Amino acid sequence: MALLPRAGGARLAGSCVGAGIAGLACAVTLERLGIDTVVYEQGDKPGQAFAHVGVIMPVIQRPVIDVVRELRHKYGIDLRPLTQVRRIRMHGSTVERDITGADLGFTFEVSREARSVTGQLAGMYHGPVLFNTRADYFALRDAFDYVVVAGGNPEISGMLGVWQDWLRTWAVGAQVLGEFDQACIEIWFDRRFARNGYAYMVPFNDKMASLSLIVPGVRRAAAIAHWQDFLRARHMSWEVVSYWDVEHVTGYVHPYQLGNTLFVGHSGGFMDPLLGFSIFSSLVSGVLAGRAIAGGKLYAQAVESLRRSMLDICRYAAFSTGWRTTTRTAWSRSWDCPALGGPTPKARGLRSSDGATAWHLWARHLLAFSRTA
Ligand SMILES: Cc1cc2nc3c(=O)[nH]c(=O)nc-3n(C[C@H](O)[C@H](O)[C@H](O)COP(=O)(O)OP(=O)(O)OC[C@H]3O[C@@H](n4cnc5c(N)ncnc54)[C@H](O)[C@@H]3O)c2cc1C
């Protein structure tokens, strides 16, 4: 593994483990702030190996509504989404409801293409990326002033004892061909095939979409069987191509910094425990790590609001578990309840005392069900 500057040189030198979303967001920020940086990437290109489409939804990112604008103005990351979501079709086991509106979120390609999130970030970073190079954390820790752990998994944070699992799921998915409205995504909450997880479809364009099923608490073989059940139960007419499956773990990290090592993105526990989404928080934690390093500031303080937002969702889960036990609602029906009654246009306008809309509370409510498998 090639190593660049020695720690303690005249200029600060940083290294990032992983040329993914968080690692590149951090590298772009460090470079702009004048810190020499080297990125180590085990793959031959930046980004996740299997192509899919990710969504950033304000319901998760509240109080941020326009995430694209927020990223551009507050974090200096100017990204082009695939499109803006204008319709979410929610499927329960017996009910179906469309949510329409202008502020439902944005879709982004997650792949190794130039138009993907990592492709766009790679275009903003001009420093060295060592591809096909698996980072040796301990070597980097000794050679650089800072190491930013952005491997997109709990490997290094787990080894260093700062990671704690929250939820283990298996994600199964594919690219599907058919006719799609690019501004419409579909979500299924149905215990028959998703247990307490969910499935969702997000279009790449009007001819191709990414279809994913997230099943908590199962091994690979069972997840694949659930995927078959999903396709059968929904009578999918789409042609399935480019199948993939991957284990997906969410967790907490504490502390966020150990000496000269900062944890960002998924490796830093910045993944919402409701849907397992983390594009936005990976970008933000990467930028904040870069700013903390360059400004000699405390990283933990910089990410405090991200940490609070994760804890907020976890606390709601605990409350709602109690509620479920009290009402003894049957599982499938309890999924239908929020699908039917939660996100109506009228309810979306209501606000609770902490500023969350009813739509946001509904999303938290879903978490409770997904946590109590
Ligand atoms: C199926 C699926 C669907 C998802 N859908 C959404 C969604 O709709 N919305 C959303 O917000 N989020 C979604 N997510 C989550 C989100 O895509 C990822 O969690 C996010 O990409 C994490 O970013 P990251 O920078 O932490 O890691 P990644 O983007 O995964 O990047 C990590 C990089 O580090 C490299 N690496 C790892 N270890 C090493 C090492 N030792 N040395 C060198 N390189 C290394 C990897 O090769 C990789 O390139 C989804 C995730 C999955 C799996």
Image (tube, grey):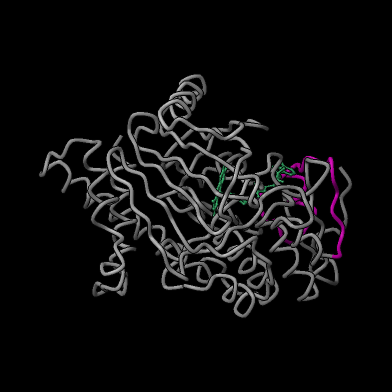
Q: Position of residue 362 (x, y in %)?
A: 29, 57
- Which residue reaches farthest bottom? 73
Q: Position of residue 144 (x, y in %)?
A: 78, 57
Instruction: Kindly identify the residue that appears in the image at 59 percent across and 43 percent down.
Output: 210
Q: Quadrant of the C terminus?
A: top left
How many numbered marks does the figure carry?
Answer: 0
| Residue sitting nearer the eye, 130 or 262 | 130
Q: Position of residue 186 (x, y in %)?
A: 46, 48
Q: Quadrant of the N terminus?
A: top right
| Residue sitting nearer the eye, 91 or 132 | 91
83 sits to left or right of 161:
right
Instruction: Kindly identify the residue that appears in the image at 54 percent across and 70 percent down.
Output: 67
130 sits to left or right of 119:
right
241 sits to left or right of 256:
right
Residue 143 counted in the magenta span: yes
| Residue sitting nearer the eye, 135 or 258 | 135
149 sits to left or right of 302:
right
**In the picture shown, does residue 97 fall above or below 1?**
below
Residue 257 visible somewhere in the drawing: no
Instruction: Kindly identify the residue that appears in the image at 33 percent across and 52 percent down.
Output: 97
Q: Quadrant of residue 353?
A: bottom left
Residue 282 visible somewhere in the drawing: yes
**In the picture shown, does residue 214 fall above or below 84?**
above
Residue 285 counted in the magenta span: no
Q: Quadrant of residue 83?
A: bottom right
**In the picture shown, does residue 231 fall above or below 354?**
above
Q: Position of residue 55 (x, y in %)?
A: 54, 56
- Which residue reaches farthest left? 326
Q: Which residues are magenta?
A: 126-150
